[in-house]
Amino acid sequence: MNQRGQAFSVFELMIAGVVAFAILMVLMTVINSIVVGNDADALTEISTAVETASPSGEVTTKTFVLQKDIAIDSPDLALNTDLDKESFIFVMGQFEDTDGIEVGEGDFLKYSGTSPKKRLAAKVICKQTNEDLSNALSRLDSSKYDLGSSDSGCAEDGIVCCVIIPIKPTN
């Protein structure tokens, strides 16, 4: 009888070890996602924000990762949303050329800095007319954002026009 009792104690100890290991793995996953964060896709985050802000509104994305030398452009957004490729204007926002962010002629967003990826977020402002867009952009603090010539709006007035403003993430 004593031998069985001792074997059962070893079995209980083994089960406790397995349970403790499982709990440790769950905790490590949670801690890792909090500290490191999940690398959200830039195109997905911006497309979701455009869908939310369109036809008239303002949305700030969650933090996302822009991979080095991979551009997000107007045709990409047009494929992922219900808007035309002429409906998008990219600006420098809270970044400068020295940060490695490029916007070309306002038709793409690209990171070409020294690290393999850049964490950022974006403010997306969509309006139905260029006048409404200009009014919305004028309410932004011009000392915080480089909006370029986006206040003139999209080339074709009367279509939904969205300005994508890269911003520094809050976390």
Image (cartoon, helix red, strand yellow):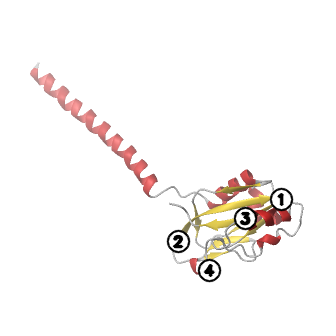
Quick one: SS at disc 4? helix
- The residue where tag 1 is placed is 160
Front position in the image: 132 or 114: 132
Marks 4 and 3 in Cβ contact (< 8 Å): no
Residue at 23%, 30% (x, y): give it.
12
First in sequence: mark 1 vs mark 2: 2
Q: CA distance from mark 4 to mark 1?
A: 28 Å
Q: CA distance from mark 1 to mark 2?
A: 34 Å
Given this view, does label 1 or label 2 mark the residue nearer the observer?
1
Residue at 68%, 74% (x, y): give it.
146
- The residue where tag 3 is placed is 139
- The residue where tag 4 is placed is 97
What type is the residue that disc 3 sits on? Answer: Arg
What type is the residue that disc 1 sits on? Answer: Val
First in sequence: mark 2 vs mark 3: 2
Reply above or below: 63 against 106: above
- The residue where tag 2 is placed is 116
Marks 1 and 2 in Cβ contact (< 8 Å): no
What type is the residue that disc 2 sits on? Answer: Pro
Q: Residue furthest left?
A: 2
Q: CA distance from mark 2 to mark 3?
A: 34 Å
Q: CA distance from mark 4 to mark 2?
A: 17 Å
What type is the residue that disc 4 sits on? Answer: Asp
Residue at 54%, 69% (x, y): give it.
117
First in sequence: mark 4 vs mark 1: 4
First in sequence: mark 4 vs mark 2: 4
Residue at 89%, 67% (x, y): give it.
156
Q: Which quadrant of the structure image shows residue 44?
A: bottom right
Front position in the image: 35 or 93: 93
| Neighbourhood count class around disc 4 (C-alpha, 10 Å): few under 14, some 14–19, many 20 upward | few
Residue 16, horizontal then vertical, whole percent: 26, 35
Residue 130 placement, left or right of 51: right
